[in-house]
Amino acid sequence: MTQEKVLLDHGSGGKVSHSMFSDLILPLFSSPELLQQDDGAVLDIAGARLAFSTDSYVVDPVFFPGGNIGDLAVNGTVNDIAMCGAVPKFISVGLILEEGFPVEDLKIILTSMAGAAQKAGVRIVTGDTKVVPRGKADKIFINTSGIGVIPPHVRVSGANAQPGDAVILSGTLADHGITVLSSREGLKFDSDIKTDSAPLNGMAQAILNSGCRVHVLRDPTRGGLGTTLNEIAAQSGVEILIDESCLPIRGPVRGTCELLGFDPLYIANEGKLVAFVPQEDAQKVLEIIQANEYGKEAAVIGRVSQKSTGKVFLKTLIGGTRLVDMLTGEQLPRIC
Amino acid sequence: MTMKYVEEYRDPGLAKGLAQKIHGISTKKLRLMEVCGTHTMSIFRHGIRSVLPSGITLLSGPGCPVCVTAQKDIDAFVEFARLKDVIVTTFGDLIRVPGSGSSLGREKAGGADVRIVYSIFDAVTIAGENRDKEVVFCGVGFETTIPTIAAGILMAKEAGLGNFSVYSANKLTPPALAALMETKGVDIDGFILPGHVSVITGTNAYRDTFEKYNIPSVITGFEPVDILKAVLLLVEQNEEGRPALVNAYSRAVSDEGNPKAKAVMNQVFEVCHAVWRGIGEIPFSGMGLKKEFQAFDAALKFGMDLPDVPEPRGCACGQILMGLKTPEQCSLYKKKCTPMTPVGPCMVSSEGSCAAFYKYA
């Protein structure tokens, strides 16, 4: 980490975040579980394998088309646990509230959380509430942590991708990030885009219980698909090739990205997963995902081409090839 | 919002057909320069270099407004951010650009009131809502952006906002092309001329430069089919020895350009000399505020006239912008200068040549 002060880029999920993690956080907290760098920690406790994960939610605005910070916070942790191959069971909720925040809004958010937990089949079992003076936090911040149980036959990790694997994406890209950006004050578009925030544990369990071999499950949230694929490529020591013509992106999302100079490959998703499975199992896994209510637009988007030092390439629409690097810092809207 | 009238310009069949034609007629080694950051991005994102013959080199010229902004102007933005009771409003691209000592992003992290806006009109609104503070807008742009900056100033004037001002580091494209052609060592066989800028200026704005230097020049749009079409036309002109100024973007660009936008721009701004990063002063290549709008000139209002400072040692942004070097030939590239620790603006702007090379090549 070369900067003296924390910048917004450190929270982008891209290279700048990674450098803070590996240069500052990891050396001080070093533990074998943290070193795995998966979506959650996998713990052996009394003969059972548990997945344990935590995430904090600071989204602005708090309410956006298709959801709010509450269901986002539940789904996010449910998904992180599900991507470890676990069945999510229990979650905790930590609330940090700004003085003056309307109780009515809080009630709406908590109601959404209860609904999201019920839908995902998890119980909220412990929590904490703090209130800080006006101006010391922005309306409401939520932390959720959760645990789940990994069935004995399941072995998924970002480090398990193998040459020949098919890469399956469960649906359209960039819906959440563009929704939040569009509804943020000062940038109002008339569009029918809404967040894709959704629990993916049902889909993940259906894949894992199908008898198909599954090497990697990951949800491409902050940093987008481009960053997630780079993480997997680096963890597994492989090269990934994706095909632009196979990437599902909604028209209004693509249009907004083009207007602002954003690449949808680096925009957050909150209800999508990528699955790496051997080629011969790809069709079956694709059908399982498509049968799920959140996976109707799933597609095979690429493959693991070979062992390598961890690079991701994109075959473009016109037949060219280019590198897909990891996001550096936050994407910034361009001048023209 | 839906984007129509685009898909046909991304048609893989059409694009592949154009690439084949280029391969079919190309015999000479050619160096073609695009002078628009959006072209640079599009070329990299669509992998256009990878489908062209190896003898054709695409160079990224001075077409990214952030990349050509002089170090002293970046320093001025940082100085504004350090002033008490000043809100600095800026397009997002500028936030990470390093000045001599700091950047707007670093000042923001240190507590300065720096706000990213998507349009100058947002900055005018901020001025209306914060009449007890001064609001400075960092004016960085080409012909595409300058008319909206002018319209913002007119709006502030009409609203009687005495607390709003603009630091104008705006620049014009055609004088830069002429300056390039006059620079020793610059070796370019054709220009891919910008689409957005030309919508405002019209084809006629390039006529003088074309007639003086007789260099193949094609205006085009930003989709892969547009860019490949421009490359094909430039290769044809070179192979046949018939340089021409061609508008291949007639769905958006006319000979005369957009008279309304030009009128607004010329109502508020007048041509002045401007310092381009790495290139130096180019006569009549900038747009400064006219006398009757001087109340809105942040440089005058705050007496902000910083000396020009040399670029950091080893930074080859200027030579890269002129096509004299590729990013890989810069001694800092991928070593001291990365998107995480940019030395020059070509590495920080998403449309910068070095950032595009780093990210996509």
Image (cartoon, rainbow, N blue to C red):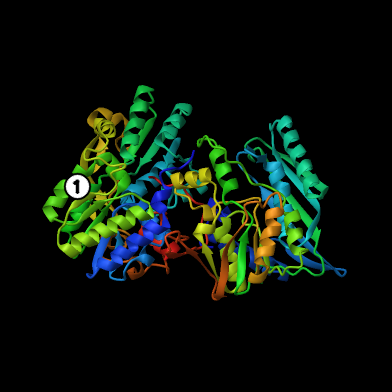
In percent of width and height, residue A85 lies at 75, 63
Identify which residue, A68 or A161, lies in the foreground.
A161
Q: Quadrant of residue A70?
A: top right
Q: Is any atom of residue A311 visible in this view?
A: yes
Question: What's the chain of the residue with tag 1?
Answer: B
In percent of width and height, residue A81 lies at 74, 58
Point 71% across, 58% down: residue: A288
Q: Quadrant of residue B263?
A: top left
Point 42% across, 37% down: residue: B119
Q: Residue furthest left?
A: B212
Q: In the figure, A48 relative to B170: above or below? A: below
Q: At numbered mark 1, what does the secondary structure look like: helix, strand or loop?
A: helix
In percent of width and height, residue B249 lies at 29, 47
For label 1, the crowd category at 10 Å Cα-Cα, with few meaning under 14, some 14 to 19 and many 20 or more, is many
Q: Amino acid at mark 1?
A: Tyr
Q: In the figure, A289 relative to B255: above or below? A: below
